[in-house]
Amino acid sequence: MPAKEATEEGISQRARLAQVVNQHIVEIVSDSGEGAQTCGQMFGTISAKMGNGVWTVEIIPAEIEPPFRSRAGASGNRIRVGKGVVTNMGDQADLVVAFNEQVLYSRIDDNAIAKGAHILLESKWKEDRLPEIRAAYAEAMKDFEERGFIVHEVPMEEECLKVVSDPRRGKNMWILGMLSAIYERDVSLIDAELERKFKRKGKDVIQKNVDLVRAGYDWAGENVDLRFRIPVAPSDVPMVVMNGNTAVGLGVMAAGMELCSMYPITPATSASHYLAGSFQKVGGVVHQAEDEIAAIGFALGASYAGKTPVTITSGPGLALKTEFIGLAVMAELPLVIVDVQRGGPSTGLPTRVEQGDLLAALFASPGDAPKIVMAPATIEECFHFMVTARKLAESFRGPVMVLTDANLATGQQNFPRPEVKEEWIAPPVDQSPWDGEVRPYEWDETTGISQRPVPGQRGGNYVLTGLAHDEKSRVAYESAINQRAMEARSRKLAALRKTLKTPEVYGDEEGDLLVVGWGSTLGAIEEAVDRLRDEGQRVSSVHLRFLSPLEPGLREIFSKFKKVMTVEINYSDDPDGLGDARRYAQLAWMLRSETLVDVDCWSRVPGTPLAPGMIVDAVRSRLNAPAEIKRSQSAQ
Amino acid sequence: MDAAGAAAGFCLEDYEGGAPRWCPGCGDLAVLNALQRYVRDEQLPPEKIAVISGIGCSSRLPHYVKAYGFHGLHGRAFPVACGVRSRRPDLHIFVATGDGDCCAIGTAHWIHAIRYNMNMTIMLLDNNIYGLTKMQSSPTTGKGHYSNTHPGGAPLTPINPLMTTLSITNASFVAQTVDWNPPHLYATLAAAHKHRGTSFVRVLQRCPHFMSGYFDEMQKDPMLVRLLTHDKGIAIDDAVKKAFPNRAEHDPSDLAAALSFAGDPEAHPVGLLYSNEQAEHYDDFTAQGLGTDAKAKVAAIEKELDRFTI
Ligand SMILES: Cc1ncc(C[n+]2csc(CCOP(=O)(O)OP(=O)(O)O)c2C)c(N)n1
Ligand code: SF4
Ligand SMILES: [Mg+2]
């Protein structure tokens, strides 16, 4: 029998043995620079194309160029593939492809791999010329077995050498082929994807990659007994797949903004990278300023001149911007500020996720500086919130902060392709004459909203100032004027709040415990709630998109639950023995003051997204907390 | 002259904002007067003028001009002005800044604004002291001079803002003038405004309140000031010539000579030190795609979305 037919025969036989699963978590880990990330992303894209839900998470090494074969060096991707929509990274990996045994240890250290997981491991190390490497490999093999992993040794390099001369480039594509056989992916989709990805590099490069994918696919067809089938349901609407930073960039354009003024900072920069490459096509520009202060100053100059811009940053950059944010509030200048949160304080964990900037977003500027703060909970919302943020910034004449985080920024998800509307696009700058009777800060009695003239409008000239000012923008130190101006700026939040809907409760509207979350934790929290409810627990959740003003009706919602608890990725003290000295997580802190309800919290700062299993455990333990802890909490 | 302005016929009053609140004899007033006369003479429509400043006595200037103004943050006038310019090639931008505002807290922006060379006129009102906050040393305060932060005298030799500016890559217009010679001040602002790019004008500005008599010597001894003259320089009349008997012919395209005049310990240069019409303009970059209409934008965004559609 010719080899090709033999392979297809083999594959179809094995297909009959395929195990049907609703979801699977796959990880690909390598030394950095070996291409595991590209491989993972493509595997995610192909799966999404076939009609699976996907969520991908980058696995980022601690250093830029870590030594090879080191625990600190693991670089790669986690791809969670599911039957329906996938909203988070899940718990532990079911199948891991590892380029060497050491990078696998960094995942084991992170508790990221399930007992019983399949490990597909590069086997070339067992014949390495260095005895210490051979010994390390042998030792790891024994250890993996003891840990209950099912190891499949795969001669990746050897097989790649049959196709290319330098297997360091290309092994990732071979693996993509292998995974495609295991997960019954349609390899012709990969060809199309490769064609798109390497178009600029030419036919030869495309062909080489196609060959590698085929080789991996065929090899697995003959040599690997694993088959997983995740039922697909192709979408009947067009779908897109992208990460949250790209979604923010696209949202900026769809909002009709024309300027992104920024200073590079991880993990925010890739949003600006994306814009830098594409903004020109829609008539916009990225300004890379000399620092974050200049970035927001430049943005506010453009805003003053009539065009609402965006400035995109992360924690340390936000710290530098605070004085100008205060000016934007004081002088009522529309501006969208995106804070892609990373671990803090100070330089913190630059590549890792945290939700530590909530209170800074609300209060970092000195004095009373009320502003709108919103937080998308999904990658799709990263896109749509930019459109909303621009409109709110203009209608309510002031800065709007949008808090995303490293999880949303680098994670990829598929969602319905947005239908961009012309009315989303900001209108051209109004240059018609200004009615001289209308003062530049003619604050509405109830809403605090006023209309602003823009340079170029005859008769509208005023001198914007950060000093206390009256409705004519004249510097005014009179106590009554200051009181009135502060009130007007504060009223705008009250007015916006009136237009917001009460958030929907996920699960029953009453029960034993309500989890409250915000931002990127939505998927993990709701999955945890599902599991707890399946266990019979009376647990629900609510997820906030507006943090300032807070969405209405919270006290009413909270009143139907015996216990309310936030789940957040920021620091808080656990409730053991600290009494009144206990410090609460940031949303809990806000909710306690807002609702006067004794809101509890569970928060962690692992530098990784929260897994649903962690939340399940946390909620369970609070539900079962000994009576005296419960009492001490309610006594506070 | 702006066509729209000529038709309307603006007079001085049309540019007069709030009544100035500077101390009597403050040199800032001379700059304000010169600016108002100049924009009147040029008939620039007030709505097309943006006067942008930081914080300080000098930065109060926008409040006194009836035009669009932006009195922002201490040290941050330049990024704001550059941002205004980025998408508004039609506006006339004037920036008022002080020696603390520009040469201390705003130093990073000063360097980069000069490098960006976006079309605007910067007026550095240099009184060699912090006025608004009551007599602290500034980076341009003379060594040994008494201030509230250095009662024993400023410990270091002052920074030379002209040499600093001249040394920045892509500098395109650097001039110096004095508040006590209105014709020269006027002519310098005129040349600065007509230059396309960032025109940096340092005005030696008297602060009678905190620096009484500080510039007296310069005013009394004409040899301490050197007027730079050239066809391509600041236009001067006989009265100006008479006021500055110590003169030197200086070609403003000669950077090396400009640096040497700027750093001359014998005499303060007055006039145009340097100008370069060939410098790059960052506003050419930031204005890209201006005026793209909503339809074209939506079409381009749809194309972008195609890239991510699966
Ligand atoms: C961030 C910040 N720091 C300090 C100040 C206080 N402050 C206001 S003006 C000024 C110095 C003003 O000196 P200069 O720029 O020379 O202007 P002048 O008053 O002399 O015209 C200082 C330190 C401030 N407003 N903001
Ligand atoms: S303190 Fe000096 S600079 Fe300030 S207004 Fe008075 S004289 Fe002018
Ligand atoms: Mg000063």
Image: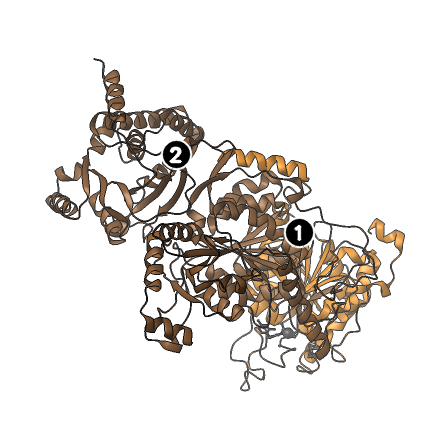
Chain colours: A brown, B orange
Q: What is the quadrant of residue B133 in the picture?
A: bottom right
Q: Chain of mark 1?
A: A
The location of residue A484, given as percent across then percent down, is 71, 73
The quadrant of the picture occupied by the N terminus of chain A is: top left
- Secondary structure beneath label 2: helix
Work out whether residue A274 or residue B86 is closer to the camera in this orientation and state it: A274
For the residues beneath circles 2 and 1, the answer to whether they share a chain is yes
Crowd band around label 2 with a 10 angstrom C-alpha radius: few (<14), some (14–19), many (20+): many
Direction from residue A198 to residue B73 in the image, left or right: right
> Residue at the location (26% across, 33% down)?
A167
Query: To which quarter of the image does residue B183 belong?
Result: bottom right
Question: What amino acid is at disc 1?
Answer: Lys
Residue A541 image-quadrant placement: bottom left
> Which disc number belongs to residue A307?
1
Separation of disc 2 and disc 1 at Cα? 40 Å
Helix, strand or loop status at disc 1: loop
- Where in the figure is residue A476, as x and y percent of width and height? 73, 75
Q: Nearer the viewer, residue A374 or B207?
A: A374
**In the depicted structure, whether residue B74 falls above or below residue A203:** below
Q: Classify mark 1 as within 8 Å of ligand 1 or not, answering yes or no.
A: no
Task: Specify whether residue A306 is in view.
Answer: yes
Q: Is residue B43 left or right of residue B284?
A: right
User: Badge 2 is on which residue?
Assistant: A47
Q: Earlier in the sequence, mark 2 or mark 1?
A: 2
| Amino acid type assigned to the residue bearing label 2 in the image | Ser
Which image quarter has ligand 3? Answer: bottom right
Q: Residues within 10 Å of mark 1 (few under 14, many from 20)?
A: many
Q: What percent of the width, then of the height, locates residue A29?
A: 28, 43
Residue A611, can we see it?
A: no
